[in-house]
Each structure stands twice: as C-alpha cells, then as structure tokens.
Amino acid sequence: MFYSTHYVSPIGVIMLASDGERLVGLWMEGQKYFGGTVTEPLTEKTDLAIFTAARNWLDRYFAGKTPAISELPLAPIGGEFRKAVWNILCEIPYGKLTTYGDIAKKVAKRMGKASMSSQAVGGAVGHNPISIIIPCHRVIGTNGSLTGYAGGISKKIKLLELEGADISGLFIPRQSTAL
C-alpha cells in the first residue's frame, strides 16, 4: 500500500508518496511523469513519520539550508540502471552542476562498460521519482543548456538560485527537452 500527502512549497504544491516507511516519490504539481513510478492507488495519510521528516527536510531546504539526503529513507522505484543514475545524482553537492555526459561516464565505469549513452542517462534523470531531494535539477547539457527538467525550466532555475549555483553562463533551450 502506498500513501500520499501534500506540501506547499515556494515553487508550488508538491506531492509526497511513501510505502509507509520510506519516501518513494516527490512530484511537483503539473510535472511531467507526475506519480509515474507508483502504479497502485495512493491513500492520503498526512501523519506518517516519513512525511513529517520529509516536510522538515523541505522546510530547511527552502530556507536555504543544506539538509543531507541520507537523513531520509528513500526507496525510488526503478530498474538497476535508473537507480545507478539516481545514486550518482545524490553525489552532486549543493550549488554544483554536472552534465548528462559526466554522469554517463560515471555510470559506465560503475557498471563495467566502455561507454554509456548520455540520452539514456537523460531518460533516467528525467524519470527521477524523488525530485529536489534526489537533485536532478543540478544536471545540465554539455553545452550549458538548462535542459530536461520534468518540473519545468523556471522551477529548475529557482532551485539552482536557492542553492547559490552559478547559472550566469547557462541558457534556456528554445524548446523543452524534458524527456
């Protein structure tokens, strides 16, 4: 059984999902792939300990603090490849950026492969089921494009600004590339 609750943030309403003990989802209202990894119905339940912990984490994050991802028990639903990509996302420090290509190189090395497709990595990043906490907003295109954020480019920019990332040399693509 899966549970949900809502959190009102500076970037809009966020839905949290849990298996009762661990966080399995965090989606911004209107986000592409909203709730996509949870295939069972969600039961609204606001008083779970994990939801209290997640709301506290988000309160601190939106107040400009840097809470550790490890404070929350996370259980993103996905295959081995996607989980490998999401684990690498968790290693990106606050206010820092990386590219899909850099992640592809790390995933290839960890999986014992000669190379990995940046597009495949982009698909995994785009389907990240625990946005913000698993920081997919810190990934940009190799050319400096603020590309591929399922929550929308304007929200990606707000999150990066909140974290103090230098986005001065980055640009918004002409059309959305969210996967």
Image (cartoon, rainbow, N blue to C red):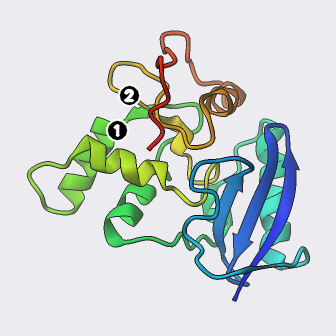
Type of residue at label 2? Gly
Near mark 1 (Cα within 10 A), the count class, few <14, some 14-19 or many ≥20, is many
Task: Using the image, determine if residue 66 lies above or below residue 25.
Answer: above
Evaluate whether residue 88 shows in this view: no
Residue 24 lies, in percent from the top left, at 62, 71
- The quadrant of the image that shows the N terminus is bottom right
Secondary structure under badge 2? loop
Residue 82 location, quadrant: bottom left
* Residue positioned most to the right: 47
* Residue positioned most to the left: 114
Location of mark 2 (residue): 141
Residue 130 location, quadrant: bottom right
- Closer to the chain start, of discs 1 and 2, is 1
Task: Using the image, determine if residue 93 lies above or below residue 45.
Answer: above
How far apart are the two marked residues, 1 and 2, measured between alpha carbons?
6 Å
Say left or right for 149 vs 11: left
Residue 9 lies, in percent from the top left, at 84, 45
Type of residue at label 1? Tyr
Secondary structure under badge 1? helix
Q: Are marks 1 and 2 in contact (CB under 8 Å)?
A: yes
Say left or right for 12 vs 158: right
Evaluate whether residue 4 shows in this view: yes
Residue shown at 8% from the left, 51% from the top = 114
- The quadrant of the image that shows the C terminus is top left
Which of the two residues, 46 or 32, is positioned nearer the viewer here? 32
Q: Which mark is residue 100?
A: 1
